[in-house]
Amino acid sequence: MDKIYKTPKSSRITISELMLPSHSNFSGKIHGGYILSLMDQIAFACASKFSGTYCVTASVDTVDFLNPIEIGELVTLKASVNYVGNSSMVIGIRVTAENIQTRKIKHCNSSYFTMVAKDDSGKNVSVPRLTLTTAEEVRRFCDSLRRIRSKKEHKEQEELFDHTSLDMLQEIQNMDIKIHL
């Protein structure tokens, strides 16, 4: 069977939504959980569009909320496939908010969602391969590779980490933390 190749451009999705008072938290800013929900939705749409299958969220890399989003601002999320594995895809997401009156746009956050393609019985299925056509697409692919490798190294370090070592206990003690077991 011949492999299918697609460009990241074929996966691109953009959604915009006006932020309402019902989306806000107690401080009057848009609730981070609401933005995360929108991010998950666009990651699903992007991965499903690219793969042609149902997809699930496997992991979410760091989400740093860079700027608060105000009620009445227009939030725009942009997503595209940055990397593909056998059944997984890394979806890059950028969130901006625009003050409709001043037209000022601010970057609110960026994140990377790993999505996995599934068949009707819930088994992983292969996804199309990537054809990278721009230097920006190559950069995003390489950045994804770097993050994946870093994640694996971090996981290996966690497995080897000895939280009972004398060095670690000394460090905890130096932080003025009491341990009562």
Image: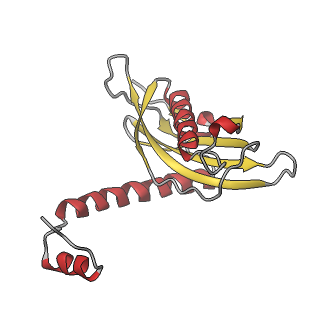
Which quarter shows the N terminus?
A: top left
76 relative to 50, above or below: below
Residue 64 or residue 138, whichever sits in front: 64
Residue 43 or residue 177, whichever sits in front: 177
The residue that appears at 58% across and 37% down in the rendered structure is: 38
11 relative to 107, above or below: above
Residue 83 or residue 98, whichever sits in front: 98
Is residue 14 shown left or right of residue 128? right
Identify the image quadrant of residue 121.
Answer: top left
Percent from the top left, x then y, of residue 130? 51, 40
Residue that protrudes farthest toward the right in the picture: 101
Q: Is residue 13 at all visible to an observer of this figure?
A: no
Percent from the top left, x then y, of residue 147? 42, 57
The residue that appears at 64% across and 48% down in the rendered structure is: 95
Give the image's coloring scheme.
secondary structure
Is residue 167 shown left or right of residue 17? left
The residue that appears at 55% across and 33% down in the rendered structure is: 41
Is residue 66 shown left or right of residue 161? right
